[in-house]
Image (cartoon, rainbow, N blue to C red):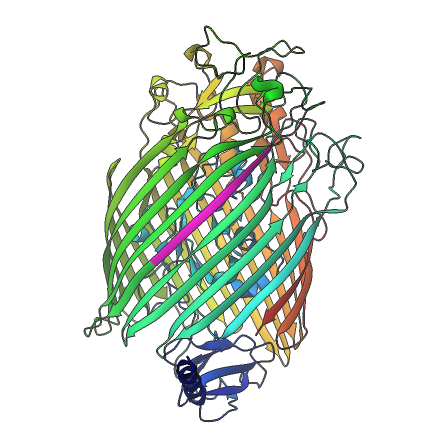
Amino acid sequence: MKKIALMFFLLNVTLMLAQKEVSGIVKDKKGSPLPGANVLEKGTKNGVSADMDGKYKLIVSEGATLIFSYIGYKSVSKVADASVINIDLSEIGEEELKEVQIVGSRNSKRTVVNSAVPIDIISVKDVTTQSGKLEINELLQYVAPSFNANKQSGSDGADHVDPATLRGLGPDQTLVLINGKRRHQSSLINLFGTRGRGNTGTDLNAIPASSIKRIEILRDGASAQYGSDAIAGVINIALNDNVNELNGSVTYGAYNTNAKGNFPVGTANTDGYRLDKNGNGNSFGKNKTFDGNSVKITANYGVAIGEKGGFANFTTEYMNKEKTLRPGFDFRKGFGEAEIQGFNFFGNLSIPVSDKTEFYAFGGRNFRDTDAYAFTRNDGERVVESVYPGGYTPRITSNIIDNSVAAGFRTETEKGWKIDISNTFGKNLFHYYTKGTINASLEERSPKEFDAGGHTLSQNTTNFDFSKNYSSVMKGMNLAFGAEFRTERFTIFAGEIGSYATYDTNGRPISDPTTQSAPIDPISGNPRPGGSQGFPGYSPSNTVDQSRSNFSLYADTEFDITDSFLLSGAARFENYSDFGSTLNGKLSARLKATKNINFRGSVSSGFRAPSLAQIYYNLRFTNFSSSGASEILLSPNNSPVTQAFGIQKLNEEKAVNGSLGVTATFGDFTVTVDGYMINVKDRIVLTGYFDATSLNLGVDQAQFFVNGVDTETTGLDLVFAWKKKINENSFGATLVGNINHMKIGDVKNGNLDKEIFFGEREKAFLLASAPESKFGLNLTYERKWFNTGLSFTRFSEVKLLDYQMYEDVANYGSFENQIAAATDKYSAKMVTDLTLGFKLSNSLKLSVGGNNIFNIYPDQQDDWVEAGGYWDAVQMGFSGAYYYGRLSFTF
């Protein structure tokens, strides 16, 4: 044992003697420090970023060469032959550095500045230190021009997973990659709420923000390059790869409960009537000045592996966010955002096998325990007075687990071919539990909690990718091709019997309605309904276990025809086991008009395969509105009930994309302007409610997934950025904007009633998910130990149609009058965010600030709204001002 200890000691001494510490300052041509400048040991992943004073410190191998770089400057290489090395990037130059992206081009030499399509590159470290946003969706909502996401309420599963959109299209029309590999989607399908109705999507919030180095957003159709789901664009998340540095933060924040509005005395969640969260959801407790209290703790650390650039980087995050509760009507006392408790772990590693070959792997696990109020049951057959006197508000809780792992080998042959072989697996589990509830047909014998079952989606993707750059062909050519094989599996699993069954007067599940009957409510005289209130459990008749496979081939080329003109093309063939084949193509170009100005454009075809959830999802649920409750059947696409209504088999959505833009750089000022057009045919939507009483299924109405409409979307993305350093002062200003217009074309209702199939109300929800505009102005200032950021975000007007559209038109005199009465108008609003940062030492930084510091709310509405609160879930949110403090550390 002593010999082993001595051997380890000698090994550590040898390693220590083979390393040295180098420090210094990185400055610009005027001698001013460059905070954030990169210092990298050449041939490795060992590197650091300069602090706010341009200072760096790095442990390197003896004889190492350091590379100093900063966006917009020229990089410098310097042998580490001294312990102190100060660098002025303006004096020695080797090559101009631009931030290289993965997404949008398979040419490793292509950069954002000269790309043929619009790409946003967002440094997550910069964004997170300049805002109080806790989740990825919140971060992107305020920095990416056409990205939109918002919290929902009263939307079942959508209360727990935020649907996000790009350029106003559906959540499932944007492809998400991690390190260039396809990420699995959520198994949740959005049924309610104002965004993404009838869509699935990828849950970006399942990825810890502190594990991310940068986010790349390709704002252009890319199905010909990346396959299904990329109609609106692609979001690629590049994970951290830094080593020998521990980064982390502790954040605490809370929301102001003082909602702006004119609320009647006694309104739930106003002063004197704050819902008692320890009660049954129908009683009031103490007043609160703040709620939604949140704590987030993060840590990221990386270690070097070997001496050829290998690394292993690990991230862990913990978040606990309490409910926010805002004024709601009597039938919706729990209106607000869900409670979330989550734990995240992510890893990213690369191990060199030889000089030109590496093994890589990344993945992680996300666990969230969420809790949200459903609609309030005040009286009637759903209330057992002896159990819940005066009523109750059930809670829908869930355990959401995302697991993922990817692994592969990259190599480069002697002839310059780059080969990447990988396999990626991901799975989402969404498990519902109802609490504070009851199965009314069991009356006093009913439990108050139920396992309601849930659903899963797993995806396995195998990729073979090949590429080569030919510098001698014209002014350069890049050729890439490859193949992909993907399998998907969607399941629905049943809950416990009490969560879905209706019991007879003897407490036995009803199996023969002719001989068994449910208890009668003595007050209303109606039969007691079965199943857990709030969210009825999945029964054995709902269970699903369906799979499919997909095989694809692609080719992708880029030609630098001249120094000024780039032309690229891509084609992709895909074959799905459940609906057949599709072939898509893309052509794009970029022209350097001058040294500072580029013109770019693209045209492409695209598609999105119907998700397994859209094909097979089914559920019986209770729909609440101001006019009461009704039992609904969501019938799967392959059901005889669906076919009886004349609903056809789901097919792929087909799209045509076009874009045209200009980029310009003039000194400290850059600008990009990109117009786009996206026509989607056979878009999959969720119908309204058809009368189903004649089917004798025990439900009032039925709805379906259909290839229901064609849409035409046109818009403009704007990004204006300015950065200036004057002596020790750094100034920055960025204006991002999106102008968007969606037009709904053909409604493919066949012989079915058009207004029920996809009527004015459903059209309004679809259009509201594509807001007419969003503009954000972000101002920053830094000096030595202090920095500040001030942001203004303007959200455009939104119009929705409320539940009055389900009333008898005769009550309004005409259909036009009914639409006018049902229209809920949310006028344009401006939200202001502020952050102040104080560097306490080289290792510690304190940030304080607020989001929506002036406590701006959407326009107040009446009691016909979708979610039962005084507002719908529009893009600016409905929780008001949020104030926070964060302590960040780097060691």
Does 445 appear above or below 186? above
Q: Is residue 131 left or right of residue 651?
A: right
Front residue of 45/163: it is: 45
Does 349 appear above or below 265? below
The picture places residue 566, in percent across and down from the top left corner, at 31, 64
Q: Residue furthest front?
A: 1
Does 143 appear above or below 22? above
Q: Magenta part of the protein: which range?
A: 391-406
Whether residue 611 appears in this view of the structure is no
The picture places residue 634, in percent across and down from the top left corner, at 44, 25
Front residue of 361/656: it is: 361
Does 620 appear above or below 402? above
The picture places residue 758, in percent across and down from the top left corner, at 45, 26
Q: For the stretch drawn in magenta, what is the main secondary structure?
A: strand
Q: Is residue 715 left or right of residue 305?
A: right
Q: Residue furthest bottom?
A: 82
The stretch drawn in magenta includes residue 392: yes
The picture places residue 267, in percent across and down from the top left corner, at 75, 31
